[in-house]
Amino acid sequence: MRWVTVGTAVALAVMCVVGSAGLGVAGCRNEQAAEAAQQHFTAEAMGTATCAACGMVVSEQPAPRGQAVHRDGTREFFCSLADMVQYAEIPSPHGALTHTFVEVLDAAADPLETDDAPRTWVEAETAAYVLGVQRKMIMGVPVLAYADAAQATKVAEPRGATVHTWAELRRRVMEWSHDNSARR
């Protein structure tokens, strides 16, 4: 459990042993889930992680990419932000997502250029998203992420694209996904 400190891990182990006598194993699992949900999470390096949605090696795909942490502390990586949005809507045995992170692009860079260089990670709720810029090598809906709305607007306006919050992006991607599945 890389997200739990050694002291916390020992305390959890003791609670599990003691709890299994009175509360049962389910009680221990609930304690672990509650502990994981209260931990402060930050973005982690992708390493050789594979996309939880498609199985591709995330670091080999063009930025921006995403990562999410479930209630039980399980971390998943995504090679596209649209994949992460769709994944977030699917119930998981690991519990709901408690933390989401996205890589942000540099507003001065050409948004049509794609590369797999690592970028700065921010909490998904704080980023601003651009929809409507077609990019090569992107699966699903091309979503660009920027550190703030001013940067996103600088990219979106000259291209006739739109700027969205995290909540708006989630709604728009799911609408797009639903519309496309209905056409099949």
Image (tube, rainbow, N blue to C red):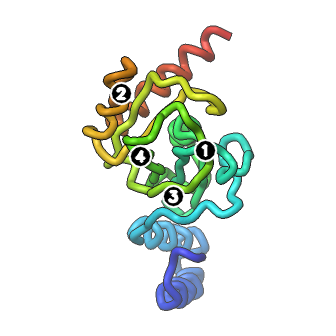
Q: Mark 4 to mark 2: distance in Å?
A: 13 Å
Q: Is residue 173 above or below residue 101?
A: above
Q: Kindly identify which numbered label has been placed on residue 156.
A: 2
Q: Mark 2 to mark 3: distance in Å?
A: 29 Å
Q: Which residue is mark 3?
A: 69
**How far from the left and from the top, in percent, is residue 147?**
34, 48
Q: Secondary structure at mark 1?
A: loop
Q: Is residue 32 above or below residue 7?
A: above
Q: Quadrant of residue 25?
A: bottom right
Residue 18: in sight, yes or no?
no
Q: Secondary structure at mark 2?
A: helix
Q: Nearer the viewer, mark 2 or mark 3?
A: 2
Q: Kindly identify which numbered label has been placed on residue 115.
A: 1
Q: Mark 1 to mark 4: distance in Å?
A: 12 Å
Point out the tag, 1 or 2, that comes first from the N-terminus: 1
- Identify residue type, mark 3: Val
Q: Mark 1 to mark 2: distance in Å?
A: 19 Å
Point out the tag, 3 or 4, that comes first from the N-terminus: 3
**How far from the left and from the top, in percent, is residue 53?**
66, 42
Point out the tag, 4 or 2, that comes first from the N-terminus: 4
Q: Quadrant of residue 184?
A: top right
Relative horizontal placement of residue 164, taking residue 104 as reference (left or right): left
Whether tag 3 and tag 4 are in contact, CB under 8 A, the answer is no
Q: Residue at x 49, y 88 (%)?
A: 11
Q: Quadrant of the N terminus?
A: bottom right
For this rendering, which residue is in front, 153 or 82? 153
Q: Kindly identify which numbered label has been placed on residue 106.
A: 4
